[in-house]
Image (tube, helix red, strand yellow):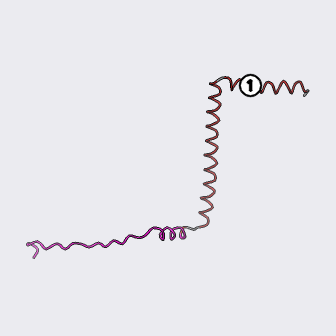
Amino acid sequence: MTPDEELLSELRKINKKFDVLSNPFKNAAYNFSSGIWHSLGTLFGTVVIAAILVYFFSQLNITNVVTNYIKKLVPQPQINLTVPSVPPSPGQL
């Protein structure tokens, strides 16, 4: 490829990008689609990393340790239930 052809190719790329930037609707569509792809990529990456972490922690079998830790953090309420005595009705005597 000669230098003139390379220059012409680069100018075409620049003109195409400038066309997108100069037209507000094309610019909005470009930004919207790039935002959607960015969000989907972030979501996919988060799901993959979360799945790997869940799998890794499920293989460790640390549920007893976590359960005991949570039991220590949350105090057990002391409930004293007393049933009030009801005097017997006259028919039950």
Residue at horizontal 72 percent and vertical 25 percent from the top: 18
Farthest left residue in view: 90
Q: Secondary structure at mark 1?
A: helix
Residue at horizontal 61 percent and vertical 41 percent from the top: 39
Q: Which is more toward the observer, 37 or 26?
A: 26
Q: How many numbered circles are shown? A: 1
Q: Magenta region: which residues?
A: 64-93
**Residue 52 is drawn in which quadrant?**
bottom right
Q: In this image, 75 relative to 9: left or right?
A: left
Farthest bottom residue in view: 93
Q: Position of residue 4 (x, y in %)?
A: 89, 24
Q: Which is more toward the observer, 73 or 56?
A: 73
Quadrant where the image shows the C terminus? bottom left
Q: In this image, 86 relative to 41: left or right?
A: left
Mark 1: amino acid: Lys
**Residue 14 is drawn in which quadrant?**
top right
Residue at horizontal 76 percent and vertical 24 percent from the top: 15
Q: Check residue 86 for magenta coloring.
A: yes
Q: Which residue is mark 1?
A: 16
**Residue 26 is drawn in which quadrant?**
top right
Residue at horizontal 63 percent and vertical 51 percent from the top: 48
Quadrant where the image shows the N terminus? top right
Q: Check residue 85 for magenta coloring.
A: yes
Examine the rendered structure and indicate whether residue 10 appears above or below residue 48. above
Q: Position of residue 8 (x, y in %)?
A: 84, 24
Q: Position of residue 45 (x, y in %)?
A: 64, 48
Farthest right residue in view: 2
Q: In this image, 13 relative to 33: left or right?
A: right
